[in-house]
Image (tube, rainbow, N blue to C red):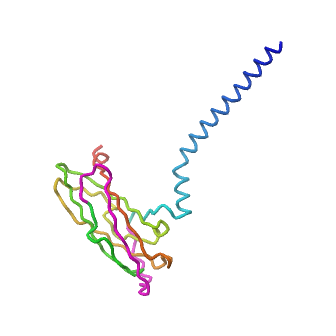
Amino acid sequence: MSKGIEQQTDKRSNGKVIKKLVLLVFAMFGFGFALVPLYDVFCDITGLNGKTNDVGVAYENDGIDTTRTVKVQFITRMAKGIPWQFEPVINEISVHPGEVKFVNFYAKNKSKRDIIGKAVPSVSPGIAAGYFQKIECFCFTQQPLKSGEDVEMGLQFYVDIDLPSEINTLTLSYTLYEISVKVDS
């Protein structure tokens, strides 16, 4: 008699474990699904993401703070496998907050085929990303280059006058990705 009770208890116990494991699997799936929006919220709160505006902004002439100078550095890199040369024409520029500046980036398609590229910007420190305003940028559009073609691509920007005073240097980094396959399909 006690053997039957033990087997029933074991079956109930096994059923509880299975239910808990299934619940755990669903919870893990839900967490994985929610991870991207949670990461975005975390980055917004901590200022770690470095995302800049995706479309041009109108220049807000709040004056130019000539008492401050901010160094803006430019860094470029290419995603693995894209056969381009991609670099800033100048590596850094000094700018007064509120002052509009224009810089160029050089790109050359070194492959034997036409390629469409897309540059993705990031600003560091991340907290300064909201103060780096792009008026016009090649990163807003796709960049198609024929085999062997080269081009200078422009960036017009300003650093918002409300940039915290402890930030003296901004780094604008572009990563160039090939999107030819995505456009073709």
Q: Image height check: is 148 above or below 17?
A: below
Characterize the magenta stretch by its predominant secondary structure: loop
At a point 61% along the width and 40% down the height, the residue shown is: 27
At a point 53% along the width and 44% down the height, the residue shown is: 33
Quick check: is 24 in the magenta stretch? no
Q: x and y percent of residue 92 in the render?
A: 33, 73
Q: Image height check: is 15 above or below 65?
A: above
Name the residue at the right extreme: 1
The picture quadrant where one finds residue 73 is: bottom left
The picture quadrant where one finds residue 75 is: bottom left
Q: Quadrant of the N terminus?
A: top right
Answer with left or right where residue 115 lies relative to residue 26. Answer: left
Q: x and y percent of residue 40 in the render?
A: 52, 56
At a point 42% along the width and 78% down the height, the residue shown is: 60
Q: x and y percent of residue 84 in the render?
A: 24, 55
Name the residue at the bottom extreme: 67
Q: Which segment is the magenta one?
A: 56-85
Q: Nearer the viewer, residue 25 or 180?
A: 25
The picture quadrant where one finds residue 109 is: bottom left
